[in-house]
Amino acid sequence: MKGLTGKTALVTGASSGIGQSIAIRLAQEGCNVAINYRKDSEGAEDTRRQAMEKACQGIEACGVKALLVQGDVSKEEDAIAMVKQTIEQLGQLDILINNAGVQTESPSEAIEADDFDWVLGVNLRGAYLCARETIKHLLAQKRSGSIINISSVHEIIPRPQYLSYSISKGGMGNMTKTMALEYAAKGIRVNGVAPGATITPINESWTEDPEKQAEVESHIPMGRAGTSDEMAAAVAFLASEEAAYITGQTLYIDGGLTLYADFQEPWSA
Ligand code: NAI
């Protein structure tokens, strides 16, 4: 995709699932990638191996670099260090993908305060801190850049039993728009990619059981869950020059889940 070769991207939570696919896809497009992970260094190594394989297939003097960056996005000192390490070791930072995310399930009246804080801390505070550090760098260098927030269909669809997750993604949608407006004139684009049900480790409660997966897929107008690679393709597009005039938008990649699936057939004659 146009304009990605030679750029540097930091992908948070890139040791598994959607983040792993994004890091691999961006490397394939010619980006240097900083692969953030919290604990799973093996997963992160796997991302690096696959990224370099895809990036350098058949290319003798392959210039793409992949760096592992450990850190917990919800901790301010880690977010600062992750961005610093990326810039020091890869020379610059042009693209931030705020992908790290967690969820907990509980009736809203019974959520433990610590669990609430954890989900908001990773999904929203973490995304903000990484964006803040990236924007500081871009402004100081007078560079244009792109931030992509991996949100969810629950940015707009309320999700009972997952209140903190719903709030975090709703907040992320507002952060996308607010930052997009604030930095549009500085050449920093901020967009969101909102996956629907996607086959990744966060969903192992249903992806590992064919009956449960069929039940989930029965609610999706296109009749199937999405893949990490489909999310990564949208991210690559939004990060590229092809999307140079797009900012402040959340792109829903959901097989039609946000289209009020119950209206697929008429309710009454
Ligand atoms: P996943 O569980 O494979 O990925 C989440 C990643 O975030 C993991 O690698 C995890 O280690 C990392 N992470 C968690 N806490 C962290 C922290 N404090 N610091 C750094 N990294 C941390 O699941 P998946 O599906 O790939 O999720 C990626 C993003 O996509 C999340 O933001 C999730 O909310 C979003 N999403 C996923 C959907 C799905 O159906 N799989 C649907 C809608 C949104």
Image (tube, rainbow, N blue to C red):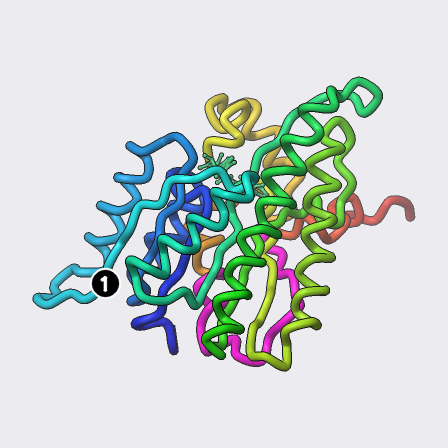
- Crowding at mark 1 (Cα within 10 Å: few <14, some 14-19, many 20+): many
Picture coordinates of residue 32, whole percent (x, y): 30, 61
* Amino acid type at image mark 1: Val
Q: How many marks?
A: 1
Whether residue 116 is visible to the viewer of this picture, yes or no, is: yes
Q: Quadrant of residue 205?
A: top right
Q: Is residue 21 above or below residue 75?
A: below
Q: Is residue 122 above or below residue 263?
A: above
Residue at 75% of width from left, 49% of height from top? 156
Q: Quadrant of residue 251?
A: bottom right
Q: Which residues are magenta?
A: 234-253
* Quarter the N terminus occupies: bottom left
Q: Is residue 14 magenta?
A: no
Residue at 70% of width from left, 55% of height from top? 173
Query: Closest to the observer: 168 or 135?
Result: 135
Residue, disc 1: 64
Q: Is residue 248 magenta?
A: yes
* Residue sitting farthest toward the left: 60
